[in-house]
Amino acid sequence: MILLLIQVKMRPLHVQTLDVVMKKIRHFGILLLLFNAFCLHAGQAHFTINIDSPVEQVIYVSKTQNNLTDEEISYQFGLNAGRSEFSLELEAPTVISLRYNQKLIPIFAKPGDRQQISFSGYDPLPTIRFSGHSSAANQLLKAWEERYPSGMSDRSVSQEYIFANMDEKLVSEAQSSSEYSYLQSVKERKNAKRNLLNSFSLDNQERVYFGTQVEYDAAAEELFYYLVNRYSLLPEQIQASKTKHNLLEGVRIHNDLSIAHPSFSKFLCIYTQYLSLTTKRDDRGVEFTFYELMEQNLRGKSRAFLQTKLLYNTFRFGQFDLAQGHFKKFKETNAAYPQYISLLEETFGDQLEFAEEGEAPNFTLVDTNGKMVSLKDYRGKVVYLSFWATWCKPCLSGFQKSLYIRKRLQDAGVVLINISIDKKAEVWRSTMERIEMPGVNLHATGEDIIRTYDLSSLPVYHIIDKQGRYAYLPENGIRDVVEEFEKLVRK
């Protein structure tokens, strides 16, 4: 019996339109699978597992579904007399994880492989044996793991919307070592791994895969030192170190052929974070800083890939400003890679569409000056409604992240109405002193508006046209939101 488990290794989604966002993420995953299958030589890899003296009747296998969304899919396979056979669909050569008796075993596999793997149930790692396809590659992986055990605990390196995992031991090494000794350790580890690689008889595909891993893992580890110690190093020191220590010497930053390799993808994320350490942050948010750094320092498919990843992650966390403000530029810059443009358009193109039809219900609420304000007071104007509360962190983050766009909308003639459903007026007023909220700020004291506008989760946003009806933006893909609002204003 085979049980399929889906594990999505993501930070939790904000509550905003959760069902809609999850639907879009699932759709995006399907599109990515189709895209990867089209671009790469996908195929099945077959595995036969034999366990001497089994102590459990189940083994777990997991693989990264795609390196754009960092989704991981896991399988559970039963054992029959210590034996299990199964096949996995692979889009490219990759390393999967096999877990048994609380031990994690990395396994290299290629589409078309037929592998035989055996080990003792009591002590899987030292006793594991490989035969069949990719056996030499897995012997290399075992030798690497024995000399440089990665362990099971990863430290997530995250600055908002760009994520990468590094080994916990590497974090400790970077924290406790001097810059020189740490970088020497990285260099020695790289050379040792390269020597091990050269000592094994691998086919060309395997040699390219592991050669790529050695180069980009070492490059990421170099830069990782500065991310770990960023609070104790000045930007000038970080900048000077690049020349002093010949950081990234010989590293191909623009490597279109390695886009599907997890080590290259991780390197690009860490490289962007490293660049941000010596760059002034954009007032609109760190995601805008990242986007511009990618624009300036990457090119080709590497840039298109990482910008797609960034745009996807900002949408995933309910922050639409970056994509809405930059998607036109993204399409122009990355016209040679329509696959990424199509994926974003088909997945998130209708993010601001509203299902409601007809006239928006009127309300009369108190503003910050104690004056009663009604929605109908703004008939003849385009209105953007934002429902929020102090306890809703995505709401407050949304105001901060969208401040630039909101001010542009206001300048374009759009009326911004922000309605708090906080129970206490003093809490509402206190929050507005901390968070800038352009527009008309109102406080709802009662359940009527919650029922009328179905505020079962927050934040909630609505567009109201000049006639007081619900409006929506076109369904033709991600757009410049300010431009589309201006069209509504001109109608």
Image (spheres, rainbow, N blue to C red):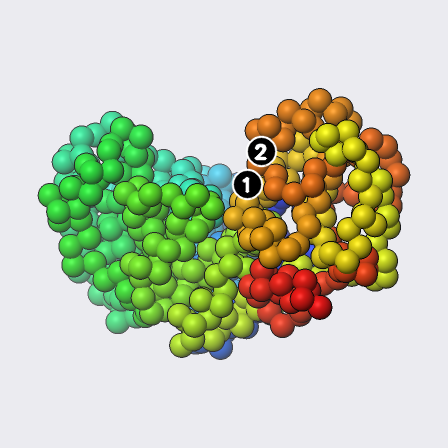
| Residue receiving disc 1 | 400
Which residue appears at 35% of the width and 60% of the height?
A: 295
Question: Residue 233 appears in which quarter of the rendering?
Answer: top left
| Residue receiving disc 2 | 435
Q: Secondary structure at mark 2?
A: loop
How packed mark 1 is, by other alpha carbons closer than 10 Å (few <14, some 14-19, many 20 or more), is some
Which residue appears at 44% of the width and 66% of the height?
A: 329
391 versus 144 height, above or below: above
Q: Secondary structure at mark 1?
A: helix
Q: Earlier in the sequence, mark 1 or mark 2?
A: 1
Which residue appears at 77% of the width and 29% of the height?
A: 370
Across and down, in percent, residue 20 comes to 70, 56
What count of labels does the image hold? 2
Which is more toward the observer, 179 or 336?
Answer: 336
- Amino acid beneath label 2: Ile
Question: Residue 365 appears in which quarter of the rendering?
Answer: top right
